[in-house]
Amino acid sequence: MSDHATAFVGVGAIGLPMAQRLVAAGHPTTGVDALPAAVERATAAGVPSVADLAEVPDASVVVVMVATPEQLGALVTSALAGAVDGQRWIVMSTVGPDAVREQGARLVEAGAVVVDSPVTGGVARARTGELTLFTAGASDDVEAVRDVLECFGAVREVGERLGDGQAIKVVNQHLCSVHIVAAAEALALADRLGLDPQAVLSMVEQGAAASWMLSDRGPRMLRGTDVEVTSSIGIFVKDSGLVAGAARQVGAETPLLDTARDRYQRAADAGLVRRDDSRVIETYR
């Protein structure tokens, strides 16, 4: 049994299986989510949950899996109304380097320790504890929460500067954004060529055109709009926007990312914002 009393903020599609990993490993864990349905679902799944971080006063570790930079800022503002001195915060959301550096500085000034550790691997790997963690922070701070981090997957330490984990996640999300749209475009092309997209997928994913996103999202692309949501179109509207913003700050050209971003926005504008990101294929129909 761990002595880390942990608050896990954001028990959504990927956050809930991550929180379940903590519970299974013996970490006393309370979920936190503003959505009543998420609180109910998490509690039923074995992760007792509440609506507000203030309801977990004994948390020594706060794992953050919110969706946006704005949500992170609001969470920190709320937390600073109480006592965070001595708490260890692990920011695992994809919120961009600037947000983690800004909010991390506020927490550190108030006496908290902050580790920047966004994840990649999706819901399937969250369930099995095989995520990849891009982890930045002082080595002693990372070591102090390693037992928590390793519940989720492989820890890849990228240095001590907060925000560098997020910067690597920006690069990662550039590729994810482009690969999903490339898979959708290719499968839509197969259909237009009069081929069976399912047969094409099973063939091309075994060759040089293979990608993890093709194999993971491809089967869902070939099903209907109501496919299970593991990552929404809205998430990729947000993430591709973070990538574009980071690129603009450093003067990097991202024409492929910009094209993919346009496709996610088209899907959102078509009413698919809460649907699975695989539904971007519908913009080709």
Image: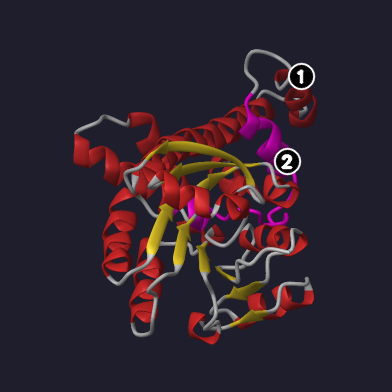
Give 22 or 203, whichever is nearer the viewer. 22
Q: Position of residue 134 (x, y in %)?
A: 48, 41
261 left or right, relative to 220 = left
Q: Which coloring applies here? A: secondary structure
Give, as a single range, the part of the protein colored magenta.
211-237
Residue at the (36%, 49%) spot, across then down: 241
Give 116 or 72, whichever is nearer the viewer. 116
* Disc ID at residue 203: 1
SS under mark 1: helix
Answer above or below: position of 276 versus 43: above
Q: Residue 56 sits in which quadrant? A: bottom right
Give 106 or 237, whichever is nearer the viewer. 106
Q: Pick the quarter of the image with the N terminus.
A: bottom right
Numbered-mark total: 2
SS under mark 2: loop
Mark 2 — residue? 222
Q: Amino acid at mark 1?
A: Met
Residue at the (57%, 49%) spot, across then down: 146
Q: Position of residue 231 (x, y in %)?
A: 60, 53
Residue at the (56%, 76%) spot, across then down: 33
Residue at the (37%, 74%) spot, across then down: 85
Q: Amino acid at mark 2?
A: Leu
In whole angstroms, how far apart are the C-alphas of marks 1 and 2?
Answer: 15 Å
Q: Residue furthest top?
A: 208
Tell me which numbered mark, 1 or 2, is placed earlier along the sequence. Answer: 1
